[in-house]
Every structure is written in C-alpha cells, then in structure tokens.
Image (tube, grey):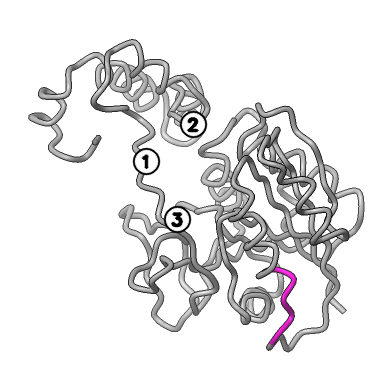
Amino acid sequence: MKYIAVLITCHNRKIKTIECLYSVVNKKGLLIDFSLDVFLVDDGSIDNTVNDVLIKFPEVKIIKGDGNLFWNRGMHKCWSIAASKDYDYYLWLNDDVIVYDNYLDELIYCSSVNNHEAIISGIIEDEKKEKILYVGADKNKNLIKPNGSIQFIHALNGNCVLIPRSVFDKLGNLDPYFHHDLGDVDYGFRALKSNINVLTTRLVVGSCIENRICRVRKNHTNIINRFKSLYSPLGSPPHINLYFRLKYYGYTNAIFYFIFLHFLNLIPDFLNNALFKKRYS
C-alpha cells in the first residue's frame, strides 16, 4: 500500500478545480495499491468553490487562505499541513490539470526505478493533445519532449510533480519567500545542489490549457499599470527575482536582471517590439 498526499492550490476557477479533482480520484486502470488523501488550499475564492468541493468530494481536506497566498505560498501551507502525517509520496498538482488514468502508475514506476530518491515531473500536454506544455527544461532552456524514456530536467515545472518521502526529508518544503512564481524552479535547483535527480516521466500523464501570460511586462497599457503588474504576485517582482538569481547565478547576473526588468517596463511598446520582437509581448 502506497500512501500519497495530493497538494493543490486553487482560486476562483471552480469548474477547472472540480474537473481536476474528478480526474485525481478516478482509480480506473491503476495497477498500484494506494491510499490517496487530497489537500486543497482554497485561496480566498468567491465563486463557491469550497461548498461545491465539499458536496462532491467530502473526503477532500480543505485549507482556507486569505486570497494572498497564490501558488507557491498556498502550496507551502498545504504541504506543511499534509506533512504532519507520514506519507510515502507528495504530489504537487495544478488545479487546471486533468490527469489521465495512468498517472499514478507512471509517476510511481519512474520513482521506483530511481529507488524513490528522485523528483519525478509528469509530462503535461495541451487539451487537444497536439503539443507538450509542461514538465521542465533542459540546460539549454528547451522544453523537454517525451521520447519513451526518463529524461533529466534542469529547470522544473511544478504542474504535476511527485516528491518521495526520502526527498522531502532532505529538502523540506517549498521556500515561502517565493509568492507565486519560481518556487518550483527553486525546489528543483535545491534538489540538484543536493545531488538529487529531477526527472521526467516516460509518458504524458495529463493535460491542461496553455498559459501564455508574459510575467515580466504587460503590454498595451501605460507605465503605471506596467509596473503594478510587474510588482504583483502574478507578475515578476524584481526583489523576488533578485533573491532567486543571487542564489543560483551570482551577484552580477542578479543585479543586471534587476535593472533589466525596470528598463523593460520603462520603455514604450514600440521600442520593446523593436528591440525584442515578440519575446516580451
């Protein structure tokens, strides 16, 4: 028997959250014997998410947020509570992901062939099953594509990630300094620094809608709104980027990028397009 805690954070997308939960608890086709506990942080939703989840999934453990946790701090809170019980695995899952029938079999198989001492990131495709969206990137910043084998990840995507107990015992929780973004990448880098492998599944394990938001610059608006967006949790707050880059890229890189983020948001749209084409649009 495998004991698994599923960790999810949601905010005001009730339909997606409900669809995700249905896919998670569906045991059809699974080969492993497991016990699944779902922990859901509802970060201040006003769309009746909590009531509907409690009606449809009374077994889900609801943790309430104040609307200011966002992804990383919501997952940190969720994990802190789940970790009070001794699970074999912790599964990060975005609430917009629909996992396939094979998802746990594939994740745990890939963990088992690595002696349950590696982080396993599940490959996620788009809803039309036409392209890969999330799993992680290689050292050249290229999104990794499935090839039937387990592959090494350099920069981790946190959409569907299995953390064995042995890894949690060494690394602990997500870093709460990160508000929404970068906490998953940071966790993967922490693992690599500790000689813990970060790996893909062999197969696609789920789907979701592609997120095409540019975090570092909001276009087609004025400079005040650009900086409000940049410094918001859903943007790319320069102080958080500074903290992240000082940890992994050094002082020069961190300071340069801090200045660059402000330059990028000071210039008008036409100059952004002239200098960087569609990179920041």
Q: Residues within 10 Å of mark 1 (few under 14, many from 20)?
A: few
Q: Residue at x 41, y 65 (%)?
A: 126
Secondary structure, mark 1, is loop
Q: Residue 39: x, y in percent?
A: 79, 52
Q: Which mark is residue 37?
A: none
Magenta-highlighted residues = 24-28
Q: Residue at x 87, y 58 (%)?
A: 58
Residue 17 percent across, percent down from the top left = 64, 54
Residue at horizontal 75 percent and vertical 33 percent from the top: 65
Q: Is residue 11 left or right of residue 276?
A: right
Task: Give above or below for 153 relative to 176.
Answer: below
Residue 26 is a magenta residue: yes
Magenta segment main secondary structure: loop
Residues under labels 3 and 2: Cα distance?
23 Å
Residue 276 belongs to magenta span: no
* Front position among marks 1 and 3: 1
Q: Is residue 260 left or right of residue 24?
A: left
Q: Give the image quarter of residue 70.
A: top right
Determine contact: label 1, label 2, CB under 8 Å: yes
Residue at which label 2 appears: 234
Image quadrant where residue 43 sits: top right
Rendered location of residue 187, percent (x, y)? 60, 46
Three-letter code, disc 2: Leu
Residue 241 locus on image (x, y percent): 45, 27
- Amino acid carrying label 3: it is His
Judging depth in this view, the residue of 40 and 4 nearest the camera is: 40
Q: Which residue is mark 1?
A: 213
